[in-house]
Image (cartoon, rainbow, N blue to C red):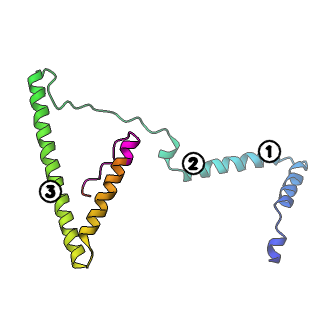
Amino acid sequence: MSFWRHINPRRGVEDFVNEWRRPQPYRWRALGLAVAMTFALMMMLIPENQRVEPATPQVTYINSWPADRTDAEIIASNIENQRRQDELEAIYERRAELRKKLYRELGRATGLDVEEMEREIARQEIAERAAAQAQDTPPREPARGE
């Protein structure tokens, strides 16, 4: 502990100021050299891509449909897209139901009362919906796969 007792930053600053105030003919040259060396060292250590402003990205717009589409083509495209979305939603729902079934089987195999857990979850969802209706906010949608 005696080593740290002798270290005092104030004494170091006072010593620096004392040496700086002494008249020396090379004081400004030494300062300039120190600044130049520090700058050169920083330029060598800092990567070039950190020293310049990044280039702005070039955006390329791609049209995936012709500009002269008719309203009927737009409607047909929207209907087809909605059909695909419905198919995907059905797949997600089937997967979620399969996942629930597997967890039910796992719960039964480990001795859990799965039916009671499902009733508790249903009670919590009803309470959340009632609280949301009381606050006039839409109820929280469960995440896919829950």
The secondary structure type at the circle numbered 3 is helix
Camera-nearest label, 3 or 1: 3
Alpha carbons under labels 1 and 2: distance apart: 22 Å
Identify whether 18 is placed above or below 63.
below
Of the numbered discs in the image, which one, if any, rests on residue 43? 2
The secondary structure type at the circle numbered 2 is helix
Q: Residue at x 20, y 30 (%)?
A: 63
Q: Are marks 3 and 2 in contact (CB under 8 Å)?
A: no
Q: Name the residue under label 3.
A: 94
Q: Where is residue 46 in the image (x, y as percent from the top left)?
A: 54, 50
Label 3 neighbourhood size at 10 Å, few (<14), some (14-19), many (20+)? few
Direction from residue 111 to residue 71 in the image, left or right: left
Q: Earlier in the sequence, mark 3 or mark 2?
A: 2
Q: Give the range drawn in magenta.
A: 131-144
Report the amino acid beneath label 1. Answer: Trp
Report the amino acid beneath label 3. Answer: Arg
Q: Do the residues labelled 1 and 2 touch (CB within 8 Å)?
A: no
